[in-house]
Amino acid sequence: MSNYVYISIETTGLEAKDERIVEIAALKIDSKTKLRTLFHQYFNPQKEIDASVSGVINLTNSFLKECPIISKKIDSFLEFIKGCDLIMRNKPFIMKFLDKELNLVKKILTSNKAIDTHDLARVRFPNEINSLDFLFRALNLEKNIIKTCLHEVILLPLLVEKIQDHETHEIN
C-alpha cells in the first residue's frame, strides 16, 4: 500500500493555457502510521488576477506579488509527492495546470498514479452527477467550511473515507 497525497490548487482562471497556479495545498498521509504532512504554498503568477477571480479564490494581487514564483518551489513540491498516489477533486483540471507548470520548467510528474474523487464517487453513487454539493449532502458533510484549497485538501481524506465502501472498494 502506498502513501497518498491529497492535492488542491487555486488558479488565476479556468484555462491552463492562459492561466497560472497561485496556490497548491497537498496533504500526505503515510499508509502505515497515518502521519499527516502538509505542503502549502502561494505563488506569484507574474500576471494580474481579474477582480472576479480574486473574489472567488480569496487571494489578492498585492498578496501574491510578494510570493515566490512557482519555478522556485516546484522541486520541493515534486519531492513531497514523490512515490505517492495523488488524490484530487477534478483531476483533469488539476493535471492540466500541473502539467503546464512543470512543462514551463522542463520537469514531468513521474510514477504518480492520479485518482479523481469523482471516479470514486461514481462507484458509490453510479446514477448521480456527483457534484461536490451532491456529495456533501449525500454524505452529511458541511460544505460551507471549504473556503480555500487548504480547507479542501484537509477535508478530502474525510470525503474519500465517506465515499468508500470499505468492504468492497479500496483506492486502487
Image (cartoon, helix red, strand yellow):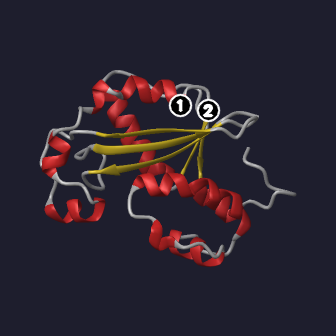
In this rendering, the count of numbered labels is: 2
Q: Position of residue 158 (x, y in %)?
A: 64, 59
Q: Residue at x 53, y 25 (%)?
A: 110
Determine crowd level at label 2: few under 14, some 14-19, many 20+ residues with C-alpha closer than 10 A.
many
Please say if the residues under marks 1 and 2 sit with CB atoms less than 8 Å apart: yes
- Amino acid carrying mark 1 in the image: Ile
Left or right of 71: which side holds 46? left
Do we see residue 137 in this rendering?
yes
Q: In the image, is residue 51 above or below residue 129?
A: above
Q: Residue at x 59, y 78 (%)?
A: 137
Q: In the image, is residue 88 above or below residue 38?
A: below
Q: CA distance from mark 1 to mark 2?
A: 6 Å
Q: Position of residue 132 (x, y in %)?
A: 52, 69
Left or right of 28: which side holds 58? left
SS label for mark 1: helix
Q: Report the residue marked by disc 1.
A: 81
Q: Position of residue 43 (x, y in %)?
A: 27, 39
- Amino acid carrying mark 2 in the image: Cys
Image quarter in which the C terminus is found: top right
> 140 or 97, which is in the foreground?
140
SS label for mark 2: loop
Left or right of 102: which side holds 67? left
Q: Residue at x 15, y 38 (%)?
A: 46
